[in-house]
Amino acid sequence: MIEFNNRIDAQRVILNLVNRGIWKEELYGLSSGAIDRWVRVNGIDPAADLPRAIRESADKLFFLANKSQEQVTDEYRLLSVEVLELTQRIARIIDIV
Amino acid sequence: MNMHIYAFGSICRGEIDLGSDVDLLACVGGPAEQIDHEKYSVYRYERIQALWKEGNPFAWHLHLESRLLFSPDGTDFLNDLGKPARYIADARDCTKFQRLFDRSYHELRQSSNSATFHLSCIFLAIRNFATCHSLSLGQPIFSRKSPLMVLPSLDIDPQAFSILTRARLLSTRGYGENITNEEVVAAIKAVAIVPRWMEALRSQHSP
């Protein structure tokens, strides 16, 4: 999760999952601007499970992005696990949607 | 709280267009919960010092293209650090961006799912590849157009390059006109030359 390409891979997995759904416009990225646009264009309730899970995973990935490679702390490992759990949560929500 | 604020990036190069925003850096001495991390890149002083020591491209970017906006005591923290160490991680960094290109290109050809994101990653890969290459030659180019400014430049149709730029803005800011299927097809075709271009740039370095 620490390595640059691993973080992009994690984003790609989340986007591929979300964009399996049928949307007027797909989710273009995990930046807050891209998520806001996706919520707005598709008329999604911002408080619904899916946008909340997406925002949470984005927060954690951007937090990881700002950390240095040497900072492999327990908190860091925990966050990586949380991203994985959030990805699984998104997959379950998408299967329901 | 001890803190220095800088502007950096496109605004310091005068590279302004409708998609530009202002890149802001906050150098802080401790936890910075009051700073909006969406608006600022927030780094601890020690982390910046470490980037300077390793000759990281971001350190060079800040060294060459940043402007002090606020100082608590009249000091200029970045300026006082002097010149960053020589950049030596070009082989590793270029491999990293080459891999990003390969994966994104592969995904893009496999399926239309998340095409804008994949195009955005391709933009990131070629821009950063060109920047790291130029930095390793001692002539750093941090512009968004760095792939078009290195030698040899990426021989890509300007229209296709603008599709990649738009994808990046859509992905990182949710800004801009969305990309049509025809544009995705045109961009896939146009970036087929990227691996050869990357090889040509790398061949300028001694093994």
Image (tube, rainbow, N blue to C red):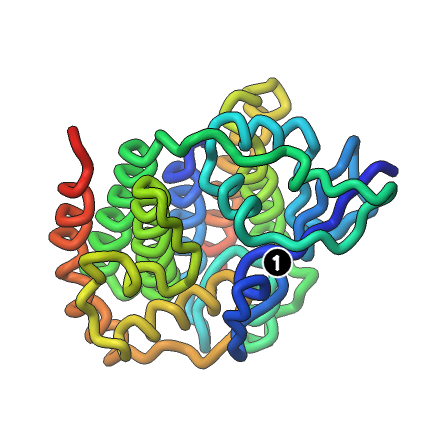
Q: Residue at x 55, y 31 (%)?
A: B52
The quadrant where residue B30 appears: top right
The quadrant where residue A31 appears: bottom right
Which residue has dot 1 on it? B23
Quick one: quadrant of the N terminus of chain A? Answer: top left
- Across and down, in percent, residue B72 comes to 86, 43
What kind of element bears circle 1? strand
Front residue of this view, candidates B204 and A58: B204
Amino acid at the residue labelled 1:
Asp
Say if A43 sits above or below A58 in the image: below
Q: Residue at x 58, y 38 (%)?
A: A66
Question: Is any part of residue A20 visible from this angle?
Answer: no
**Left or right of residue B104, residue B69 in this image:** right
Say if B67 sits above or below A23 in the image: above
Q: Residue at x 60, y 67 (%)?
A: B21
Q: Residue at x 55, y 58 (%)?
A: B9
- Across and down, in percent, residue B76 comes to 73, 42
Tell me how many marks there are: 1
- Across and down, in percent, residue B48 comes to 62, 33
Front residue of this view, candidates B71 and A62: B71
Front residue of this view, candidates B47 and A74: B47
Marked residue chain, label 1 = B
- Across and down, in percent, residue A26 comes to 44, 69
**Left or right of residue B33, residue A44 in this image:** left
Say if A97 sits above or below B61 in the image: below
Q: Crowding at label 1, few (<14), some or many (≥20) Cα neighbours within 10 Å?
A: some
Question: Is any part of residue B117 visible from this angle?
Answer: yes
